[in-house]
Amino acid sequence: MKWVRIETPSRLHLGMFDLAGSLGRRFGGIGVAVNRPAYVLEATPSDKLTASGPDSERALVFADRYLTAAGLTGGARLEIKHAIPGHSGLGSGTKLGLTVALALAKLYDQPTEPYALVQAVDRGRRSAVGLWTFFQGGLVVEGGRKSERGAPAPLLMRYPMPADWGCVLAIPNHLTGLSGSAEAEAFARLSPTTAQAAEISHLVLMSLLPALVDRDLTEFGAAVTRLQQLVGKCFSPVQDGYYSHELSANLIETMLAAGAAGAGQSSWGPTVYGFVDRPETGQRLLQEVKTRLNGSGWADVVSFDNQGVSVSMG
């Protein structure tokens, strides 16, 4: 029997460049893939469309969208073995949509071009960081959208993360980031300026990216921390501060105090991260974070993913 297995890494969204869109393109952004948490989905042919496991209901929605967009009338049996926590800032919606679409495309011998898949499941309306980290992994920079109805934002740069850099992730329990209509309303309430976009873009172009190429984690981390402050200032009218939750802000402070080269909040949170270059630093951060969480959340040292989605077939 034909089967397809898809393994998909999470993404950390480090920030958006231009919320005002004064040059005709809005948003733009930078992000990086991490190996955990991840989606693991197995798909087999079936006359009916069924799904089991975590996020199965949402998977069925994406599957129906893809089959309709592709003009297919068949079904499939989808089994989700592992899932990325929803509304946590790790890109679960785009990752699941693309995971399902790619699995069905492989089952039905359909094209797997990135733009076609992401549009078939109606993702990537604002950010394309999830799209490009899905297919390529590493750190990606995307160039913003001309309109919500147009093509997803183009990939401008993709660079592998150094193998000796690591990341401490923390996901507090009982907190969620914005999504859906609440997210749309939040964006509508913002009053971004061109000056903010210029400062963010200058920092990314002249510090964060060169530091990555030079493998200078000290400069890279400092740039990420500053980027988070600049982006957080843009979103502060709807977050009541630089970060979406007080606990997220406290965890970031804890990571920096414990030796993280840089730290921040992914997307709307509540997931936060801290960059490290030595295993002992990562373990020290992890213990401090776990103490701060006091059993109310998940935390671990994870690796950056430079591969993107993994596909197995048989």
Image (cartoon, grey):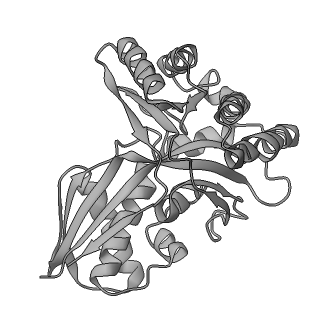
Image location of residue 110, percent across then percent down: 38, 86
Image location of residue 77, percent across then percent down: 17, 70
Residue 124 falls left or right of residue 188: left
- In this view, the residue in front, 46 or 188, is 46
| 76 in relation to 165, above or below | below
- In this view, the residue in front, 217 or 56, is 217
Image location of residue 170, percent across then percent down: 41, 28
| 94 in relation to 113, above or below | above
Residue 19 seen in this snapshot: no
Image location of residue 274, percent across then percent down: 52, 29
- In this view, the residue in front, 48 or 36, is 36
Residue 61 falls left or right of residue 129: left
| 64 in relation to 33, above or below | below
- In this view, the residue in front, 72 or 218, is 218
Quadrant of the rendered image containing residue 81:
bottom left
Residue located 43% across and 85% down the image: 111
Residue located 19% across and 76% down the image: 3
Quadrant of the rendered image containing residue 265:
top right
Residue 303 seen in this snapshot: yes
Q: Quadrant of the C terminus?
A: bottom left
Count of number-bearing discs: 0
Q: Quadrant of the N terminus?
A: bottom left
Residue located 44% across and 79% down the image: 112
Quadrant of the rendered image containing residue 109:
bottom left
